[in-house]
Amino acid sequence: MNFKELLVLYILAVALSVGAQEKETKDEKPAYYYDVLGKVKAGLVFPSAYGDNFLAQNYDIRTGVHLDAMVKIDKVRDLGVQIQGIQGVVTNNDNLGLLESSTITSAFLVLGHTLLGRKNDLEFNANIGLGYIDFRNRVGLRRFNDSGTALMAGAELSYRLSNAFGIFIAAQSQWGFLRIDAAESVRGFLRNTRVFQPIFGIKFYIL
Amino acid sequence: MRKLFIPLFALLLFSAECESEIEFVGNQRLLFKGRTIDFQGNPLASVPVKIYASRNFFDSGDFNPSSNDELLGEADTDADGSFSLITLSPSNALNIYAQINTFNRGIQANSTPIIVNGINFLEKDDFTFDLNVFTVEALRRFELGIERQNNTTDTLNYSFRYKPEVKNIDFNPYDGLGPIVYSDSGFSGVLTPDDSQAEFLLNVRENDTIYMEYRLLNSGSSQLEALQIVVKENENGFVFEF
């Protein structure tokens, strides 16, 4: 078991114990979904790239971090922002040049919809997002950026351990559309990225 | 004052080093493509091709890469002899050059390495530099000999010129030499009356001509003579007798 897996287990254990403690001590009426103002989530991302593109063919992408903050806009929908940071190491330089690694940052404006669990501790949400993706590329000590737009769609299952605290697991797909100028024959390979990523983490409810 | 001077000096050194490094343009990639054939026009597969970017410009025939030159990418030619390389796009390169059939990893030790200089002066179409077709010519081991036969008194001053092992192709329009340049290699020497012979081993191209100039010196009298030696098929050498 490596450090990242231990970290995930630790976060889950802490979340469960905090939730259990709060549940034991609280005697107030539970605040259901429509009683909260919003949600803040923090988690770990386990991305894997797929498809015929440089990210899938030439990179080893590592565990990253996920943050999002959502504000409720009506009984079932919320709006917010999501930010993710992932580190990618180049494992194959064919058709890529001399890149060594990239820090991949994405930021999305997210619209969420609660499908189930509006009156339960268990909650199921679907999210879509439109945003920005940035590759901060490294060659030795030198840096340069590739950037573009991105789309995101995902589903999330969360369990509310107390009024203010819960845990979540999510699956998300991201489509990146980089604005890289290149010969027509290689544009598709260099411009499009496809990433599927499970996300685990903790969730705070803003009451 | 000294405390201030040392970091400032280090900063100056660092910035000077950075200036000599190749930087890259974001959101842009380049494609280099071309083809290699042999002397008979047959495609040459597995020929290594390397593309470099440099902050220095070197003249044709004076191939002198800097340690700061950046290897943009490398590939081998396919069965059709074609190569295609996607690279980062340098922003401050003065010279982009290619090594084809590179010295340290040539497909055949008996073939010419080719230096393609000044690729950045070619017209770029759709972020592509089309380097066209290169002929990787065969090299021959050729033995040159000088033997003293009847003349036992004269000193022989000699010089040889021939096309070098490395074929230089230059697209830099500012060197005034035209788009393609083959520079000569050569050497010269002296055979005194005490010496009876001299031998040299050269790598030259098939059917090339070696130019020899010589002068026999005897008591101050001299006359410059010239000779052309053709590297013919099935001939491994030539001996100049005097």
Image (spheres, rainbow, N blue to C red):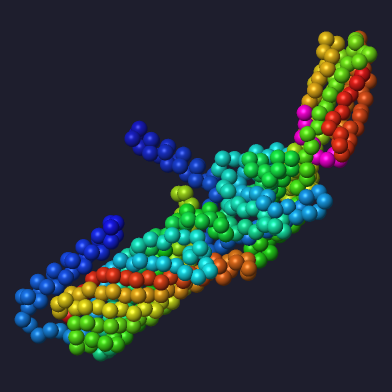
Looking at the image, is B189 positioned above or below residue B8?
A: above
Q: Which image quarter: residue A114?
A: bottom left
Q: Where is residue A93? Give x, y as percent.
A: 53, 55
Looking at the image, is B41 positioned above or below residue A110?
A: above
Which quadrant: the N terminus of chain A?
A: bottom left
Q: How many marks?
A: 0
The front one of A113 and B101 is B101
Q: Main secondary structure of the magenta part?
A: strand
Residue name at image x 87 percent, y 19 percent: B147
Relative horizontal placement of residue B133, taking residue A169 as reference (left or right):
right
Q: Which image quarter: residue B164?
A: top right
Q: Where is residue A146? Give x, y as percent.
A: 49, 64
Residue name at image x 54 percent, y 66 percent: A190
Which quadrant: the C terminus of chain A?
A: bottom left
Relative horizontal placement of residue A6, taking residue B119 as reference (left or right):
left
Q: Is residue B220 visible?
A: no
Q: Where is residue B204? Give x, y as percent.
A: 79, 36
Furthest toward the front, the residue is B234
Q: Where is residue A116? Give x, y as percent.
A: 26, 87
Residue name at image x 25 percent, y 78 percent: A158
Question: Is residue A74 in the magenta section?
Answer: no
Looking at the image, is A92 positioned above or below residue A24?
A: above
Q: Is residue A175 visible?
A: yes
The front one of B53 and B152 is B152
Furthest toward the bottom, the residue is A75
Residue name at image x 66 percent, y 41 percent: B103
Relative horizontal placement of residue B201, taking residue A129 as reference (left or right):
right
The front one of B139 and B188 is B139
Magenta stretch bounds: B201-209
